Image: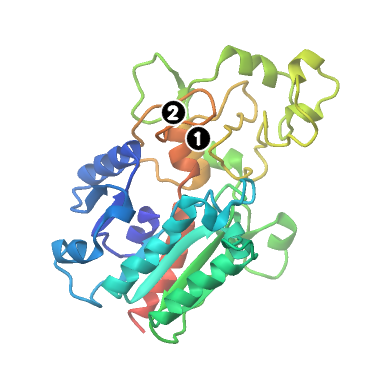
């Protein structure tokens, strides 16, 4: 999200991040770019916003933009949807706590679209979102929100997320119009380009190095286990293993036809499915996982941006985020930029 906000012309004064590998990524790129952003490796719930504001030498109301994408698993439609019963759900309300102290001119938030229907502690659907918007209103903010598909803004991935922009007074903020769409729409009278595809996104990357190779700084590393190479073999481009009933049962194993994203081989002619933390998709034509660098290309990261931390070969629960998960948890930079561009216009109106 920082990348897009920076590209729109804002400066980022501080980042609050609790994951050590993400902090390593942030610090490395900040040093490379000679930026002075403070990276605060800490649980945001334990930070005192008043002290932070003083450390940043800001006065109440001086901050132009408070932005972030709090962890969203509590509201995810593919998760258990515990809402406010899950402590991660409460992290969304840290935005309110910081806004109350900083009184920023604009607040910019990204969340999974499941937030709109998330249940509160009483089990009432949609009440979490209403409570959040109400608390912002109590601070004097007027909010607008919209579900946005990243593919509509030049990202090679169909990824739907809700974005919220809150301001202190009524204004002319409008979410940006899509710049891309399905091929049939792109051929209409509307000035819109076809979706950016996986094939276009990963074009030009050389063969990845192996886990034991020496060139790892670009994250283009193949860590696919032998067993997964065997299981994906024979799955056509754009298809998933469970749907290949002609393949041996020992290859499909316990997968069912509902497992449409497990052992999924992407298509070069379409945007990718949503990149997720729990799974790694497979290369369109080679029997291997996507590398983190290929995921970054699909997500819209610039090639000069470097990830730090391990590249794990298998999905599953881990304490800290490996490189594939760092990408999957992030906001596609082109989407952050087009929205931040519209926010920037408010300061020049």
* Residues under numbered marks 2 and 1 in contact, where contact means CB atoms less than 8 Å apart: yes
Secondary element under disc 2, as helix, strand or loop, is loop
State the quadrant of the N terminus. Answer: bottom left
Q: Give left or right: position of 299 versus 268.
A: left
Name the residue at 33% across, 28% down: 217
Residue 69 seen from this side: no
- Where is residue 224? Give x, y as percent: 54, 20
Name the residue at 64% across, 30% down: 284
Q: Which mark is residue 220?
A: 2
Name the residue nearer the viewer: 304 or 255. 255
Q: Say which quarter of the image contains residue 98.
A: bottom left
Q: Which mark is residue 294?
A: 1
Secondary element under disc 1, as helix, strand or loop, is helix
Residue 70 seen from this side: yes
- Where is residue 56? Give x, y as percent: 17, 63
**Image height of 346 relative to 263, above or below:** below
> Tag 1 or tag 2, which sits nearer the N-term?
2
């Amino acid at each position: 999200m920082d990348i897009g906000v920076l590209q729109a012309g804002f400066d980022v004064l501080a980042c609050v991040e609790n994951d050590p590998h993400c902090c390593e990524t942030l610090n490395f790129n900040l040093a490379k770019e000679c930026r002075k952003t403070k990276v605060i490796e800490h649980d945001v719930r334990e930070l005192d916003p008043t002290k932070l504001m003083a450390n940043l030498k800001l006065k109440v109301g001086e901050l132009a933009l408070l932005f972030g994408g709090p962890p969203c698993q509590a509201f995810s439609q593919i998760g258990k949807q515990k809402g406010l019963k899950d402590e991660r759900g409460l992290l969304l309300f840290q935005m309110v706590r910081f806004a109350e102290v900083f009184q920023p001119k604009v607040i910019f938030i990204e969340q999974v679209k499941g937030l709109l229907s998330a249940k509160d502690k009483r089990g009432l659907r949609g009440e979490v979102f209403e409570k959040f918007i109400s608390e912002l209103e109590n601070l004097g903010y007027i909010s607008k929100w919209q579900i946005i598909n990243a593919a509509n803004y030049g990202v090679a991935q169909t990824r739907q997320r809700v974005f919220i922009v809150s301001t202190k007074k009524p204004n002319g903020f409008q979410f940006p119009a899509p710049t891309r769409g399905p091929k049939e729409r792109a051929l209409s009278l509307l000035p819109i380009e076809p979706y950016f595809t996986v094939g276009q996104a990963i074009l030009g990357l050389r063969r990845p190095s192996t886990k034991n190779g020496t060139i790892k700084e670009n994250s283009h590393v193949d860590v696919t286990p032998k067993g997964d190479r065997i299981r994906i073999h024979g799955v056509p481009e754009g298809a998933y293993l469970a749907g290949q009933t002609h393949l041996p049962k020992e290859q499909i194993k316990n997968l069912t036809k509902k497992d449409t994203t497990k052992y999924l081989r992407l298509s070069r002619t379409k945007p990718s499915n949503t990149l997720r933390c729990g799974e790694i998709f497979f290369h369109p034509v080679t029997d291997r996982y996507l590398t983190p660098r290929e995921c970054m290309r699909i997500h819209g990261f610039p090639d000069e941006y470097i990830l730090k931390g391990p590249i794990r070969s298998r999905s599953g629960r881990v304490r800290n985020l490996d490189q594939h998960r760092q990408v999957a948890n992030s906001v596609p930079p082109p989407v952050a930029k087009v929205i931040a561009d519209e926010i920037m216009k408010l300061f020049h109106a």
